[in-house]
Amino acid sequence: MGSTASGKNGTWRNWGGNVSARPAREAAPASVGELAEAVRRAAGDGLRVKAVGTGHSFTSIAATDGLLIRPHLLTGIRTIDRDTMTVTVEAGTPLERLNRALAREGLSLANMGDIMEQTVSGATSTGTHGTGRDSASIAAQITALELVTADGSVLTCSAEENPEVFAAARIGLGALGVVSAITFRVEPVFLLTAREEPMPLGKVLADFDQLWTENEHFEFYWFPHTERCHTKRNNRSMGPEQPVGRVGAWIEEEFLSNGVWQTANLLGRAIPATVPAIAKAASRAWSARTYTDIPYKVFTSPRRVRFVEMEYAVPRVAVTRVLRELKTAIDRSGLRISFPVEVRTAPADDIPLSTASGRDSAYVAVHMFKGTPYQSYFTLAERIFAAHEGRPHWGKVHTRDAEYMARLYPRFAEFTTLRDRLDPDRVFQNDYLRRVLGS
């Protein structure tokens, strides 16, 4: 959890290094009772309250000058219920710990994002997702929540109990209260066969509907300044297990994806003219491979090269048009982009502030290496995303406001009305929430 470490002067910084905050005080509650007491006391002292996970958001969603709650003592599995096939975990549990614990029990989540450093509450509260034709975001797999509200009361909610709070709080942005525990739907552990292969961008876009239809989990990475993509298809498999060999895993994950990639990006940052050559080399470095393993070993991989990211959800039917427009705009701009553009999908869900709320969605993510100026690239991309009714990821860089969100989310008012009821004094307010939800 190094990214949430405070500096000597009490400054908190996020993982991407683009957000910092100086809270008046910090708390690390070890129980729900201690968490409720910390919230009550802060509210009584007129302090705003924010919980922070591992700082993997690139927006200031967790920043506060009031009380910063660190959840690292609120971790671990509370219960596994094999009758209902659910697992209840403390909010500060890292996804990695959850995934490993479930695997030991012969269980798994149905779908997950591509990293597992985040806490379960940080990941779900911001709408973290992977890619899936039928299976949705991590938050869509929640069956119950425990929430500490502004007056310090502990609220449990599910589809049966406090259903209107449950509906919204699954992706609550930290605006409705501090999540203290989450219950996820799980299933018996299964195997996925991953097929990774290079493919020309033109072919990926021409065949996108077919690639999406025929695979449970399809995603691709396009390297700007090239016509090359790296595609990945994950499908359930009867086995046998054929994991990536240790040497192969080291070459892919550590050497290519983290070690060489870091060096290449440092070079690109120092000498931008080298970026197109780096992009061409990087797009060729990823070779075709097929392997079969349990879900978290297929869905996730380590990401140690730090970057800043913007991601928008656009209607799935619009994604190929968005990509073509983005490519044209980059080619014309003279910008030098070393990081690939990542494209994933999600089915429509019923969570009011989910980026896939009510519509089948495709996600387009743009990244810049930490420390390189990203504004002009992100501005160019955002203009295209917004023109296609794009919804920005709550935890990634964007410039949209509440007026825009209200237009793009049919159930936006449902969320803000509930917020007025649960947090009338805006104990959980910060600058970011004021911008995206209104005051």
Image (cartoon, grey):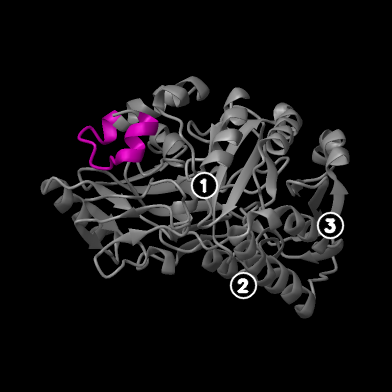
Residue highlighted by disc 3? 195
Name the kind of residue labelled 2 in the image. Arg
> What is the x, y in percent for residue 194?
80, 58
Q: In x, y percent, where is residue 216?
A: 77, 46
Magenta segment, which residues? 420-437
| Count of residue discs | 3
Q: Disc 3 and disc 2: Cα gap in Å?
A: 25 Å
Residue where numbered disc 1 is placed: 142
Question: Disc 3 vs disc 2: which is toward the camera?
Answer: 3
- Determine which residue is flagged by label 2: 104
3 or 1: mark nearer the eye = 3
Q: Decide if residue 114 is on the left or right side of residue 71.
A: right
Above/below status of 352 relative to 431 = above
Q: Residue 163's quadrant in the figure? A: top left
Q: Note whether 414 is above or below 25 in the view shown.
A: above
Q: Look at the image and say whether residue 433 sits in the magenta stretch.
A: yes
- Do we see residue 152 in this rendering? yes
The residue carrying pointer 2 sits among few (fewer than 14), some (14 to 19) or many (20 or more) residues within 10 Å by Cα, namely: few
